[in-house]
Image (cartoon, grey):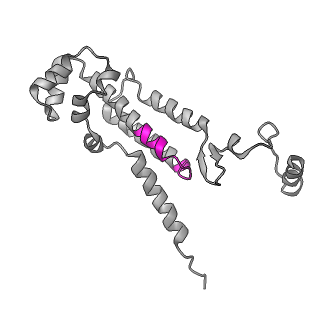
Amino acid sequence: MKESVTHFIEKRLKLRGNQEKSAVDYVGKRKFLGYRLLNSGGLALAPQSLVRFKNQMRRLLKRNRPMSFEERIRRVNAYCIGWLGCFQLAKCKRFLREMEGWIRRKLRCVRLKQCKRVKTMAEFFMSLGVEDFNAWIQAKSGKGWWRMARTRTVHRAMNNDWFRAQGLVSLIGRYEVLKGERNRRGTEQVCPVV
């Protein structure tokens, strides 16, 4: 089978096939352009694509990178929008939901670290509507940034609406918009040329 397909591609279509990447295997074990084919015929993300996405997010969201919060959000948005444009055909809603929460938590860590001092952090919490007592308790806690970013006070202060106001793009929202556009294009009728 492989020889037959290779012969057709190289002789008839006059294309060169990569012998290292070419193989005959079960559908679920192979990847192509970052996708893997499901037994049902749908597309899913290849494991390598998931790892690459998370590594890129780690690089962009490193707390020790000197960058304003707004610039960081702008870069995260740019990467996520481009990545979703490439992988909009995959069934990846659960992965996107997990990544959305993880990205928000990383951004909370970054924003908390930018406060630097206890007083600044407490004032930041109070400016976001946290009661004075809770703001000071949270600011004085000895928890690390990652643990603190998961506390109720921090979640209440920097909730999803706050991130929306900061301009962070929702991965799920963007995915559904792209999916809706794809479905609309598929149902549109082509006008005949006169």
Which residue is pictured at 38% across the width and 20% down the height?
64
| Range of residues picked out in magenta | 85-100
| Residue at figure coordinates x 51%, y 44% from the top left | 83
Q: How many marks?
A: 0
Residue 20 point in image, percent of width and height: 80, 36
Which of the 4 quarters of the picture holds residue 167? top left
In the image shown, does 15 or 138 lie closer to the viewer? 138
Where in the figure is residue 166, as x and y percent of width and height?
28, 41
Q: Is residue 136 left or right of residue 54?
A: left
Depth check: give the residue in front, 154 or 40. Answer: 40
Indicate whether residue 87 is drawn in magenta: yes
Any magenta on residue 15? no
Direction from residue 139 to residue 39 in the image, left or right: right
Q: Position of residue 139 (x, y in %)?
A: 20, 20
**What residue is at 37 percent from the left and 33 percent from the top?**
72
Q: Quadrant of residue 117?
A: top left
For the point 77% across and 42% down, the residue is: 25
In this view, the residue farthest toward the bottom is 194
The rendered magenta stretch, by its main secondary structure, is classed as: helix
Depth check, front residue: 153 or 125: 153
In the rendered image of this protein, does residue 82 appear above or below residue 155?
below
Residue 115, quarter of picture: top left
> Which image quadrant: the C terminus?
bottom right
Percent position (x, y) of residue 46? Answer: 61, 40
Which residue occupies the extreme front position in the image?
40
